[in-house]
Image: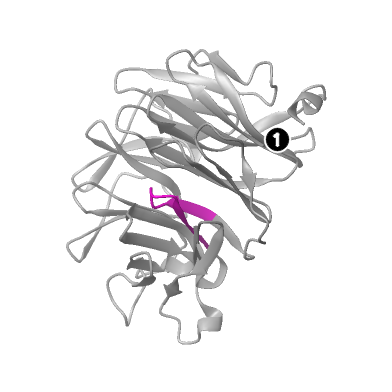
Amino acid sequence: MLAKLAKKKGVESYVVTALPVGDRLYVGFNVVDGDEDFVGSAAISVDLATLSATLVYESTETMIDYVVDPDGWQCMLMHGRVVEVEPGSKPVETTKKVPDGLYRMSSLRDRRVAICGDSGKVVLYAKRKFAPLKVDTGAEDPAYAEDLVSVHFAAPNRSYAVGSYGVFLKGDAKQLAPAWSKKNPFAVKTGRVRVLSVYETKSGAVLLGSDEGPALVFDKGKFTKLAGLPKEASVYAMVEHGGKEYWSTTDNLLFVRTGTKLKKQRGLAGGYRMESNGKVMASSCGSFVYLHDGAAWTRLRINPNPKKLVERLKLDF
C-alpha cells in the first residue's frame, strides 16, 4: 500500500503518536493526499541508535490511536477494528467490531488497553474482547454523559479520564467516577471548558490541560491554576522527562513547570502528543517527530515511503 502511495504527488504522513520503548521508537501515522484526505496508515519500528526503520503494519484504513507495552506488544485502534502485534510475530486483526465513538487509548502495560470516547464511554480491550467500564460522569441522566477526550492509566489499578465541559474522573480498571466532588465533577469551575489531557506524575500530582483554558495541577485534593500560558493557549500534552515536567501547547510551544508557573522553553519543540521512556522523550508534530535524550534534540521526518520511512533533518528551532 505505501509503495503505491509513495508514487503519488502531495502524499505525506501525519503522525498519530511516537512511543519510545526500550531502544526502539514506535511510530503510528496516517497518510494524507494532496487534498488532505486520509488514504492509508502504517506503524513502524525505529532503532534509536541507527534510525533504521522497519514497517510493522500498513492499511488503507485510518489509524485512530496506537499504544505499545514495555515488552514490545503493540495495539492499534483502527477505524472499526483493533490490530495486535506480538513481539516477533505478524499483526493480528480482530474480527469483532469496535464499539462506536471511541478514539483515545491508554495501555495498562499488561496487554490490556482502555479506550475512551463519546457519552462517557470507556471500554477495556483484552484478549480480543471488549468490556465496558462503569463510568459515572456526574450527569443526572446517563444519556447525557459528557464525552471523554482522554484516558490515562498511571498504573493498572489507577486511572483518570477527562473530557468536554471540564469533567475529571478517577478510578481503576473497573470503574471511574468524579475525582474530587460528586456534586461538582468538573475540574474547571468557571466556564467548564473542554479538558484535553490528563497525566499523573511520579509524585502523584495530576496534571490537567484544557482547550483555551487554564492549566491545572490536582494534588492532595486541591486544584492549583498555573500562570505563564499565552492567552487562549490550549494544552495538548504533558509528560515527565529527565526530572522535569513538560507541557505542550498551541503552536508547538513547550513549557516547563516550576512551582505554580509555566516557563516557556527556547530551543525546544512541543507537540500534540508527548511520550517518554525515561531516557528519550518523543514529541509528535505533523509529519515530524522530535526526540530529546536529555542533552540534545533530534528531528525526524516520517515518510510514507517504504524505501525511506525515516529521514533525519536539521533542527528548525
Residue 35's image quarter? Answer: top right
Q: Is residue 40 above or below residue 221?
A: above
Give the side of residue 284 with respect to residue 216, left or right: right
User: Would you say residue 54 sits in the magenta stretch?
Assistant: no
Please name the residue shown 56% across and 35% down the image.
89
Magenta span main SS: strand
Q: Position of residue 27 (x, y in %)?
A: 54, 33
Please name the residue shown 47% across and 12% down the image.
50
Please name the residue shown 81% across and 21% down the image.
7
Query: Which residue is tagged 1?
Result: 31
Q: Position of residue 160 (x, y in %)?
A: 36, 61
Give the secondary structure at mark 1.
Answer: strand
Q: Position of residue 274 (x, y in %)?
A: 42, 38
User: Taking the image as drawn, is residue 317 in sight?
Assistant: no
Closer to us: 179 or 79: 79
Name the quadrant of the N terminus.
top right
Residue 22's image quarter? Answer: top left
> Label 1 is placed on what type of residue?
Val
User: Would you say residue 109 sits in the magenta stretch?
Assistant: yes
Q: What range is drawn magenta here? A: 104-116
Give the side of residue 135 with respect to residue 182, left or right: right
Closer to us: 124 or 214: 124
Residue 138's image quarter? Answer: bottom left
